[in-house]
Amino acid sequence: MKTKLINLLAVLAIIFSASSCKGEKQNETETSDAEEVREAPATALTYSVNTVSSVIEWTGKKPAGLHTGTIKLSGGEVTTETGKIQSGSFVIDMNTITVTDLEGDEKAGLEGHLKGEGEGKEDHFFNVAQFPKATFEVTGVTEEAGKTMLSGNLTIKGISKNISVPVSSKVDPNGVSMTSEVFTINRTDWGVNYGSKSIFENLGDKFINDDIELKISIQANPTS
């Protein structure tokens, strides 16, 4: 009887553990092939991305912990009609990858590794010398389950995949503000394979999670 109870508890622990791991992923995106970019109506208003106040926050995880950081935008625009977003394109400056949870040499070392600095490490992560920019181009805007879903082609390292992201937005005479919920992408879909146990065998606990959590905050100003 005691053995059966122990076995039952072990099974429940495994189920609970698996469920907990799945629950850690926030708004996990599904990728598909790139789609046609959405064109704005001729009557739409255009706003230019404010590169000072717009930012992407990221979180990467591994068994030993996690790292957080930011990436800035270098340009882009948003169009609206009747107070709703119609189209948009955003340019992400990969040279601005910043680590926010470390300081000093550790911070500089991880930032350099992510950017591909150092002989033999160029393509470990984002290889910014070869791919200095990433982009997101809107392909659709829909309402699903009370949420606004922004679909677009995300291009990283020359690879384009379509994803859908839950966002909230505000449009007024002063401009457009748009913020995504935290969402998750699988970095290997864009060829960022370093330390991935789904790509490489025998990594033990030295792997880095495939999933990256992102949160996008966009501010855009009227063009005239």
Image (cartoon, helix red, strand yellow):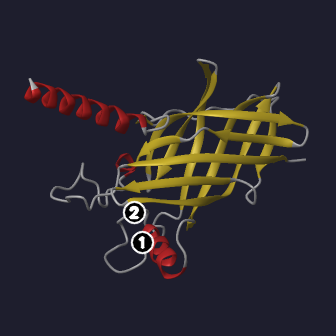
Q: Which badge, 2 or 1, is on the more N-terminal residue?
A: 1
The residue at the far front in this view is 2
Residue nearer the viewer, 112 or 39 = 112
- Determine the secondary structure under disc 1: helix
Is 62 situated above or below 23? below
Q: Classify the position of the N terminus by image quarter.
A: top left
In the rendered image, which quarter is residue 33 located in?
top left
Residue type pointed to by label 2: Phe
Q: x, y percentage for residue 60?
A: 44, 55
Residue type pointed to by label 1: His
Q: x, y percentage for residue 73?
A: 65, 57
Q: Are marks 2 and 1 in contact (CB under 8 Å)?
A: yes
User: Which label sits on residue 105?
Assistant: none
Q: Total label count? A: 2
Q: x, y percentage for residue 3?
A: 8, 29
Question: Residue at image x 77%, y 41%?
Answer: 177
- Determine the secondary structure under disc 2: loop
Q: Is residue 133 visible?
A: yes
Residue nearer the viewer, 58 or 85 = 58
Mark 2 Cα-neighbour bin, 10 Å: few <14, some 14–19, many ≥20: many
Mark 1 Cα-neighbour bin, 10 Å: few <14, some 14–19, many ≥20: some
Is 40 situated above or below 195? above
Q: Is 20 displayed left or right of 90 in the figure?
A: left
Q: Which residue is mark 1?
A: 113
Question: Residue at image x 50%, y 54%?
Answer: 59
Q: Is residue 129 visible?
A: no
Is 37 situated above or below 100? above
Disc 2/disc 1 C-alpha distance (Å):
7 Å
Q: Which residue is mark 2?
A: 125
In the rendered image, which quarter is residue 40 located in?
top right
Q: x, y percentage for residue 147?
A: 63, 24
